[in-house]
Amino acid sequence: MIEGRGLTKVFNPPGKNRIIAVDNVDIRIDAGETLALVGESGCGKSTLSRLLLLLIPPTRGEVFFEGQALTGLKEKELRLIRRKIQIVSQQPESALNPRWKIADSICEPFRIHPDSLPPGSHMGEKLEKLLELVGLEPEQAFRYPHQLSGGELQRAVIARAIALEPALIICDEPTSMLDVSTQAAIVRLLRTLQSRLGCALLFITHDQGLAHAIGDRTAVMFGGQIVEEGREILDKPFHPFTRRITSFPGTGSLQCTEPEGTRVPGSCVYYQFCPEKTEKCLHSPDMLEYKGRRVRCHNFSYA
Ligand SMILES: Nc1ncnc2c1ncn2[C@@H]1O[C@H](COP(=O)(O)OP(=O)(O)OP(=O)(O)O)[C@@H](O)[C@H]1O
């Protein structure tokens, strides 16, 4: 349904070294599935999701949505596609206008795209249905954002995200600012909505437990690259980085699993940290495929 090929994003902040935030990534999400994208802070997860929506232009690479190349489309054409892809981010309060009542924010997509309301249907009915789907009381929709809890606000953001029945929802750490019990409730809600609406989810998280619980497939990112991807990769990891992060039983966050380091030019992205590196790892490996699993490691060819 959505596919990124060879996606690369290089930032050139003035007066600072260039940053290769996303480095030659191939990614595919099929209709109705959940891909969990997991990796430590700063590895490029959010940048990759923004590239998929072309909210930022790729330095290299292409994006296809339902077979159509998005790179090269005009902004107006892109807007029509973006209505089928919605984002739920980690800070619900910044996604909602603080001066608008919740109901106005949830109904905003219908005002922007009036043609999305079927003839004879009213915004009020749609609102009622959306509130029910996300578990908010009608009375809560007539409050302002500061009058709701973090979990309730995230439910409102999700209601707005599903208003136009998107094909894909990109969830960028949607629960990281919430307490543990609210996190679980929001994850359950996303799962329920996904099966009712049939949409796909790209679920970005630091938390490998969450990735394991929610993902049909998991992609592990390190240093701007997807280093391993497939089903059950957190149960049976192959890449040395995936093995390292899954070797801490019970850990959720992947933050600070590796020290800061500078990449040896042209080498495997994990070269400096890898206990199994050999001379050939001075050359960046291609993504290798075996039995539905993709791994970016020279040693995988011998598995
Ligand atoms: N607009 C920008 N200008 C310069 N550098 C940027 C910009 N956006 C992101 N970066 C850098 O690109 C790298 C990847 O950032 P990104 O936000 O994609 O990582 P992330 O994996 O989503 O991190 P987190 O989990 O902390 O949100 C980081 O080094 C970040 O500092």
Image (spheres, grey):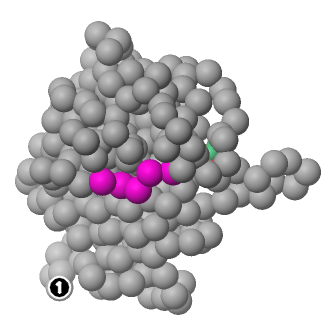
Can you give x and y, in whole percent of width and height, for residue 182 in the image?
Answer: 30, 23
> Does residue 218 appear left or right of residue 92 in this picture?
left
* Residue where numbered disc 1 is placed: 119
> Along the line of sight, which residue is nearer the eye, 242 or 256?
242
Q: Please tell me whether residue 292 belongs to the stretch shown in magenta.
A: no
Residue positioned most to the right: 15
Residue positioned most to the top: 249
> Does residue 42 appear left or right of residue 154 in this picture?
right
Q: Which residues are magenta?
A: 284-288
Ligand 1 quarter of the rendering: top right
For the stretch drawn in magenta, what is the main secondary structure?
loop
Can you give x and y, in whole percent of width and height, for residue 165 in the image?
Answer: 22, 66
> Does residue 231 appear left or right of residue 268 in this picture?
left
Note whether 243 is above or below 162 in the view shown: above
Mark 1 beta carbon near ligand 1 (under 8 Å): no
Residue positioned most to the left: 196
Can residue 102 be seen here? The reply is no
Residue at the (12%, 50%) spot, across then down: 291
Quadrant of the rendered structure where residue 115 is? bottom left
Can you give x and y, in whole percent of width and height, for residue 290 in the image?
Answer: 18, 51
Residue at the (51%, 51%) spot, across then down: 284
Quadrant of the rendered structure where residue 117 is? bottom left
Can you give x and y, in whole percent of width and height, for residue 238 in the image?
Answer: 27, 33
Note whether 21 is above or below 163 in the view shown: above
Quadrant of the rendered structure where residue 276 is? top left
Residue positioned most to the front: 279
> Along the line of sight, which residue is nearer the eye, 203 or 162?
203
Kind of residue at badge 1: Pro
Q: Quadrant of the N terminus?
A: bottom left
Residue at the (34%, 35%) spot, across then down: 239
